[in-house]
């Protein structure tokens, strides 16, 4: 069955980095090691020829594939050295021979040339065993890299509106990127650039004062943010007098009026509580730094951009036409009426993050529809001289779609609330857990059922998103993501639970003790997997001994596993037979 694992309850990413980070860096990855072998093989086979090395996981039965031969053959022809190899296949054969010769660490089992010039690479089982053992002993370790300060801007819902399914991908992908960067040793600022400023707040503040006139002494009981926003918008559209009130509230808010600012903070706080409910369920940590934070930076940033000749006047507006972009639409950093918009805020945010925070790397996780916007923002920042050798990345993603391939909506045509989507995932996962418990005749408490349902339900939603091509639209299907077969989180959790069951049984059967018991049991499974059983001979049966034993051809694997488990081969053989018979009986 599924057992949910405890999660980090710390609130700051820096705490997680301090306590959970591995103390050392990992050796080169398998792909890096293979690429290094292929590079040395190329240099030995064809000295003086430069060609990019192409090594990738294989889908043809091998572990990896070296696809360098064909571009290398062209490079030889271009260099006038075609006599050194008559065809891409001849290039591949020469490379394959040198790859084996250049493998000084016993990484390769064999290399085989296939087709017109592909080299299939088979990794040595001993190398895989050693790598797995190292991971089991020491845990996974990050690749070697220089620590940087990274700002990851993701999720970013709008205040006074509930989070919807459109925020799902940004939140999950952004959190995953942050976790990977933290694991690699970088200092990560997880920034939630919430929409907490703009002309719509005049409408919302005016409506708040009408509906909850005592808002200053009693927290407004806004139960449904989405409905509150719709009600305010309806009054704004239908009532000309209220429209004037709303415009006046915007002026007061931007001027720093105490009452308007207090009402604004009340609305933001209601939203913040609702956002946190979703983030808590997803186990996502963020630091809110909304649009309003950058208000004080916008005028000096625009003044600076104007002084250095990056921003120019255009019919009263200040605009930027960054060089090297293919878009005709400029960035409007100040409107002709003197107001500011998204372009103004995002330029101020880039300036603040690069020059005030001294971040080395900015990552923006938004839908692909904003690609043009960020291309212009990044180009303008480079034109202003803010970037230097620092890194700016936009991480675009596709839409979440329904079965019809269109934007995922409710039957009434409204956008699906993210909280409702997570509720449904939990409901379905819980129903499945309860059905399995009933089928097994097991009784478990509420805490167990809730914990397992959360692990399976929320895990299924997260994994389904991450398993898809990031930049493609994907069809959201509860049935597929909660399936126990295929590339799903429940299948992986099920496989994990089965492995842990093998660990427990092997440890109990072999009477293992001590902190190394678990990793030694798992390492032994590598050998146990190669062990086959044979029926005992009649003489053994007559003495009442086990009706099965390890086959003679599997003795080497048995002895290797026994050494890892620090038990005698005969003792392990008896334990394995018992486990085998017990498993078969189930």
Image: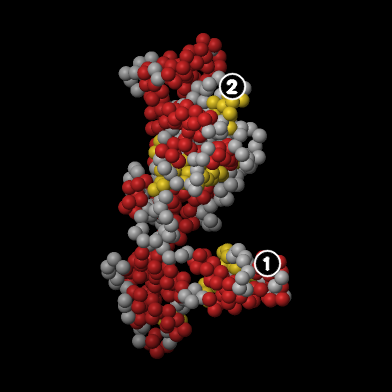
For mark 2, what is the residue? 316
- For label 2, count other residues whose C-alpha is less than 10 Å away and answer few (under 14), some (14-19) or many (20+): few
Kindly identify which numbered label has been placed on residue 299.
none
Residue lying at 53% horizontally and 21% vertically, measured from the top left: 338
Left or right of 240, for residue 88: right
Q: Residue at x 46, y 29 (%)?
A: 300
Within-10-Å neighbours for mark 1: few <14, some 14–19, many 20+: some
Colouring rule applied to residues = secondary structure
Left or right relative to 493: residue 320:
right
Q: Is residue 257 above or below residue 312?
A: above
Provide the secondary structure element on which disc 1 rests.
helix
Mark 1 → mark 2, Cα distance in angstroms: 56 Å
Residue 520 horizontal/vertical position (percent): 35, 70
The number of callouts visible is: 2
The quarter of the picture where residue 133 lies is bottom left
Q: Are marks 1 and 2 in contact (CB under 8 Å)?
A: no
Rendered residue at 42%/18% (across/down): 255
Residue 111 visible to the viewer: no
Q: Note whether residue 532 is visible.
A: yes
Task: Give above or below for 151 relative to 293.
Answer: below
Determine whether the residue tagged by mark 2 lies in a helix, strand or loop.
Answer: loop
Left or right for 73, reference 573: right
Q: Position of residue 1 (x, y in %)?
A: 41, 57
- The residue at which mark 1 appears reads as 75
Outermost residue toward the left? 514
Which residue appears farthest toward the top when viewing the image?
A: 241
- The C terminus lies in which quarter of the figure? bottom left
Q: Between 171 and 390, which is closer to the camera in this rendering?
A: 390
Percent from the top left, x then y, of residue 544? 35, 83
On screen, residue 249 above or below 183: above
């Amino acid at each position: 069955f599924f057992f949910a694992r405890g999660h980090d309850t710390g609130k700051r990413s820096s705490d997680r980095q301090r306590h959970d980070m591995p103390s050392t860096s990992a050796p080169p990855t398998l792909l890096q090691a293979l690429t290094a072998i292929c590079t040395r093989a190329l240099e030995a086979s064809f000295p003086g020829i430069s060609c990019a090395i192409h090594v990738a996981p294989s889908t043809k039965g091998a572990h990896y594939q070296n696809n360098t031969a064909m571009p290398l053959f062209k490079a030889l022809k271009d260099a006038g050295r075609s006599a050194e190899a008559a065809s891409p296949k001849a290039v591949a054969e020469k490379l394959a021979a040198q790859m084996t010769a250049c493998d000084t660490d016993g990484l390769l089992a064999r290399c085989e040339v296939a087709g017109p010039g592909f080299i299939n690479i088979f990794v040595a089982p001993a190398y895989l065993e050693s790598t797995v053992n190292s991971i089991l002993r020491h845990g996974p370790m990050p690749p070697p890299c220089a620590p940087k300060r990274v700002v990851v801007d993701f999720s970013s819902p709008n205040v006074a509106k509930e989070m919807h399914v459109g925020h799902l991908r940004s939140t999950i992908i952004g959190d995953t990127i942050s976790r990977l960067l933290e694991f690699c040793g970088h200092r990560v600022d997880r920034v939630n650039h919430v929409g907490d400023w703009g002309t719509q707040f005049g409408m919302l503040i005016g409506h708040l004062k009408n509906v909850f006139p005592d808002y200053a002494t009693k927290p407004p009981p806004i139960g449904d943010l989405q409905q509150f926003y719709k009600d305010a918008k309806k009054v704004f559209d239908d009532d000309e007098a209220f429209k004037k009130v709303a415009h006046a509230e915007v002026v007061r808010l931007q001027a720093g009026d105490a009452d308007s600012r207090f009402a604004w903070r009340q609305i933001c706080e209601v939203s913040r509580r609702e956002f946190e409910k979703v983030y808590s369920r997803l186990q996502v940590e963020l630091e809110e730094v909304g649009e309003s934070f950058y208000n004080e930076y916008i005028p000096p940033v625009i003044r600076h951009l104007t002084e250095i000749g990056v921003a120019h006047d255009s019919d009263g507006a200040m605009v930027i036409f960054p060089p090297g972009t293919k878009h005709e639409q400029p960035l409007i950093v100040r409107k002709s009426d003197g107001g500011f918009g998204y372009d103004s805020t995002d330029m101020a945010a880039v300036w603040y993050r690069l020059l005030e925070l001294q971040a080395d790397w900015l990552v923006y996780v938004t839908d692909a529809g904003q690609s043009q916007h960020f291309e212009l923002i990044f180009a303008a920042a480079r034109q202003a001289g803010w970037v230097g050798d620092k890194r700016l990345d936009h991480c675009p993603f596709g839409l979440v779609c329904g079965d019809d391939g269109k934007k995922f909506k409710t039957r009434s045509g409204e956008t699906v609330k993210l909280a409702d989507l997570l509720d449904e995932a939990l409901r379905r996962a819980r129903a499945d857990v309860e059905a399995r418990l009933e089928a097994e005749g097991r009784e478990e408490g509420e805490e167990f059922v809730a914990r397992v349902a959360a692990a399976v339900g929320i895990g299924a939603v997260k994994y389904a998103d991450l398993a898809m091509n990031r930049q493609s639209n994907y069809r959201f299907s509860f049935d597929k993501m909660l399936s126990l077969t295929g590339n799903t989180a429940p299948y992986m959790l099920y496989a994990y639970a089965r492995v842990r069951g093998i660990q427990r049984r092997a440890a109990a059967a072999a009477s293992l003790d001590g902190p190394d018991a678990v990793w030694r049991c798992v390492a032994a499974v590598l050998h146990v997997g190669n062990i086959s059983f044979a029926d005992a001979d009649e003489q053994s049966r007559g003495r009442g001994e086990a009706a099965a034993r390890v086959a003679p051809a599997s003795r080497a694997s048995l002895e290797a596993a026994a050494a890892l488990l620090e038990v005698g081969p005969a003792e392990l053989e008896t334990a394995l037979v018992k486990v085998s018979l017990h498993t078969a009986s189930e």
